[in-house]
């Protein structure tokens, strides 16, 4: 891969929408990944190698797209230079630019740093070493937004159908939005009142509770989903996307009821390359919009989202006197320090201290 010299003037360039790895620089096209039909002995291009490295380590789709995006921004920032010809000074310059000129948050800058560390370590086989005097974006200390029980009830009143059921599971079991959407039928044990969260954040499995008040609604919902699945099978479809290599190891499992999504989409997706059809889980944007609308209609002024339900779940458990270690396990936190943020929320305001104004 030939990349322009850094000393040359920065050219005008943009990503070619027809190819994820192509970059147009004037009339010159720089290919960052191999084109279809390339010879087998040709070394894969940079973005293709990065994508393969991420997938081989089972990174999520969102992380994959994020790391690819940061790699493209890094290359464009340095005038389309080959990352293999650069190192710690160029990474430092890029990250400092994000903090000083870009005014990005600390989490955004850290995400860019993680993407570049992965690129150099696992794709280029190069140790960045000491990045030097890196200007880091300031990380503010913020408390999570937490709803009162009455506010949760008010939001639920404006939700209906399967979105209401999802909100019940997120608040009642402390689920993240994507953990809820990626539930499969076999992950829900209705008799034992528990939910198995597979491959949660940090590739960790955990058990959490299934709210007793949601059991009947969940049973009715699964009954409808099974009817839809049966109709799909009768039409010759009914297969679901399988994790990792299980589709090859168990060819018939994709159509098995236990592997189906608890919250499938209304319409089947079509793979235009193979002609196969199936159902993916509900898109997260659908739930986010419905919850946002319910918050607005309930008249709340708090910036509440789907994740706020998880924050409220943890806080309300601590209010009820449950041990912080128990809450830590239910949330799936690696360190109890992460869970302790909710104890700060409990102490906020005048809960344990009486205002001197009240004694006048």
Image: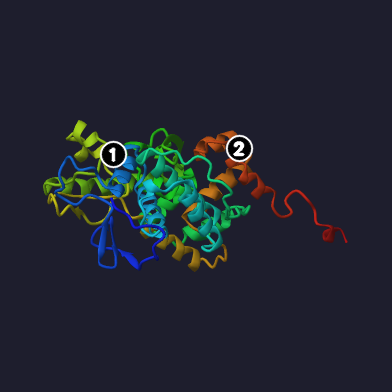
> Where's residue 325, x and y in %?
58, 34
| 13 vs 2: above or below | below
Packing grade of label 1 (10 A; few <14, some 14-19, many >=20) is: few
- Residue visible at 16% across and 41% down in the picture: 40
The tag earlier along the polypeptide, 2 or 1, is 1
- Residue visible at 72% across and 51% down in the picture: 351
Residue identifier under label 1: 243
Residue furthest toward the top? 249
Packing grade of label 2 (10 A; few <14, some 14-19, many >=20) is: few
Q: Nearer the viewer, mark 2 or mark 1?
A: 1
Residue identifier under label 2: 322
Viewer-proximal residue among 30 and 295: 30
- Residue visible at 27% across and 63% down in the picture: 16
| 52 vs 267: above or below | above
> Where's residue 18, x and y in %?
23, 62
> Where's residue 71, x and y in %?
38, 52
Quadrant assignment for the C terminus: bottom right
Q: Quadrant of residue 189?
A: top left
Q: Quadrant of residue 160?
A: bottom left
Element type where label 1 sits in the image: loop
């Amino acid at each position: 891969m030939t990349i322009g010299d850094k000393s040359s003037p920065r050219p005008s360039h943009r990503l070619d929408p027809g190819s994820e790895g192509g970059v147009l620089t004037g009339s010159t096209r720089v290919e960052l990944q191999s084109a279809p039909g390339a010879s087998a002995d040709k070394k894969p291009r940079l973005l293709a190698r990065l994508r393969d490295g991420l997938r081989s380590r089972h990174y999520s789709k969102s992380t994959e797209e994020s790391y690819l995006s940061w790699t493209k921004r890094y290359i464009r920032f340095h005038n389309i230079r080959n990352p293999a010809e650069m190192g710690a000074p160029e990474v430092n310059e890029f990250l400092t630019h994000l903090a000083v000129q870009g005014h990005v948050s600390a989490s955004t800058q850290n995400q860019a740093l993680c993407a570049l560390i992965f690129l150099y370590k696992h794709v280029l086989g190069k140790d960045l070493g000491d990045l030097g005097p890196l200007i880091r974006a300031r990380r503010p200390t913020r408390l999570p937004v937490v709803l009162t029980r009455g506010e949760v009830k008010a939001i639920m009143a404006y939700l209906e159908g399967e979105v209401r059921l999802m909100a019940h599971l997120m608040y009642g079991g402390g689920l993240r939005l994507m953990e809820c959407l990626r539930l499969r039928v076999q992950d829900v044990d209705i008799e034992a009142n528990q939910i198995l969260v597979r491959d949660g954040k940090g590739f960790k499995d955990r058990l959490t509770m299934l709210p007793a008040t949601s059991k009947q609604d969940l049973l009715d919902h699964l009954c409808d989903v099974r009817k839809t699945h049966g109709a799909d099978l009768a039409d010759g479809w009914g297969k679901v996307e399988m994790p990792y290599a299980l589709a090859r190891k168990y060819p018939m499992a994709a159509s098995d009821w236990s592997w189906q999504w608890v919250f499938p989409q209304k319409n089947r997706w079509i793979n235009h390359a193979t002609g196969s059809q199936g159902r993916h889980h509900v898109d997260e944007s659908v739930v986010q919009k419905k919850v946002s609308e319910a918050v607005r209609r309930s008249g709340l002024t708090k910036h509440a989202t789907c994740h706020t339900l998880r924050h409220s779940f943890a806080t309300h458990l601590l209010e009820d006197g449950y041990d912080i270690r128990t809450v830590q396990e239910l949330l799936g936190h690696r360190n109890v320090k992460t869970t302790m943020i909710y104890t700060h929320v409990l102490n906020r305001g005048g809960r344990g201290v009486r205002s001197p104004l009240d004694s006048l």
